[in-house]
Image: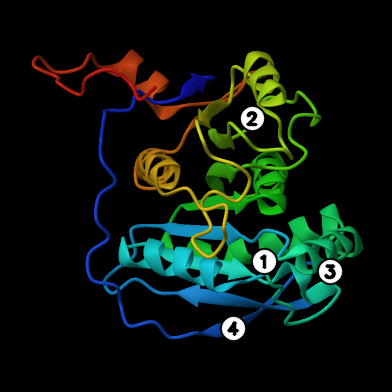
Amino acid sequence: MHRGGQGPRQPRIALPPAGPRVPREDVMFQLTAADGHGLSAYRAEPKDDARGAVVLIHDMFGITDDMCAAADDFAARGYLAIVPALFDRAAPGTVLAYDEEGFARGVTLVEEVGREPALNDIQAAVDAAREAGKVAVVGYSWGGFLAYEAANQLRGLACAIAYYPLGVVGAGAEKRRVPTLIHFGATDPLVPVDQAQRFRDQRPDVSAFTYEGATHGFASAGRATYHAAATCEAQARTLFWIGQFVEGQAPVQLKNAGAYAQAKTEKKKAKAPAGDDLGPPLD
């Protein structure tokens, strides 16, 4: 597994257990985007006071059980989690099967919804989530691309995480305004490993990792593409990232230089205490 880009130094850690899951209630509520569009969203509440919030952006299959389970998991770890239904602009309530027909329909809906309207809907979710504190955005596939775009386009984000994002390889080279983390699958036919490597080489301001044996959709437990080891390691990095930037100090905005990781700014303020045994970064 390879690391590229800059980011906080990460200890070698195993994925921490979420603990007992809060009894799940499929709570859908309404959001209103800036252009007046109303959309539904799945909301998972933490049992105790929230440590912050996570807005999850679904892939081209909609708010599937996998997306709800991911939101529930973040809630079990203490975060308010919201999943906006981005397909509501084209086909309200649509959830697609993990098959060729579902994929084809999802591609059509992605085109019908469009980038800017989707970002408007994500902004509505971010605004709603801010009641719980700082907000991270986590996206998958199409949602990964939108999370990457949201990092620079939306207000109120502390950090962005993208799983196997479509389209980022050809995205603009604008520096990241908030810390951005990306997970690539080494055998992903939709984001070939050579393209992922080229992206990492060209974008030192983004922390990007490649997972051996993992393909597109490797973090969706309900799909044949699920890869448990890659999911576990990617989730550990994601939780570390969110812990740094949602629960920690906000990233510092440097003039004409984008947003830099908290660890960089902290390093200037104080040296690590003696006996720091965090070990080498994940690789």
Position of 163 with respect to 202 (left or right) is left
**Mark 1 vs 3, N-terminal side:** 3
Q: Amino acid at mark 1?
A: Tyr
Question: Which x, y percent locates residue 70?
Answer: 46, 63
Report helix, strand or loop for mark 4. strand
Residue 111: percent from left, percent from top: 89, 58
Asked whether disc 1 touches disc 3, contact meaning CB atoms under 8 Å apart, the reply is: no
Which tag is nearer the camera, tag 1 or tag 3? 1
**Would you name the residue on which mark 1 appears?**
98
Image disc number at residue 35:
3
Residue bearing the label numbered 4: 29
Residue highlighted by disc 2:
176
How far apart, in angstroms, are the residues tagged by discs 2 and 1?
32 Å
Residue beneath the point at 27% across and 60% down:
18
Crowding at dot 4, Cα within 10 Å, few <14 / some 14-19 / many 20+, comes out as few
Q: Taking the image as drawn, is residue 112 in sight?
A: yes
31 or 25, which is in the foreground? 25
Separation of residues labelled 1 and 3 (CA atoms): 31 Å
Looking at the image, is mark 1 or mark 4 nearer the viewer?
1
Amino acid type at circle 4 is: Phe
Query: Nearer the observer, disc 3 or disc 2?
Result: 2
Q: Nearer the viewer, mark 4 or mark 3?
A: 4
* Nearer to the camera, 270 or 173: 173
> Image quadrant of residue 12?
top left
Q: Residues within 10 Å of mark 3 (few under 14, many from 20)?
A: few
Local crowd at mark 2 within 10 Å, few (<14), some, or many (≥20)? many
- Give the residue type that dot 2 points to: Arg
Q: Secondary structure at mark 1?
A: loop
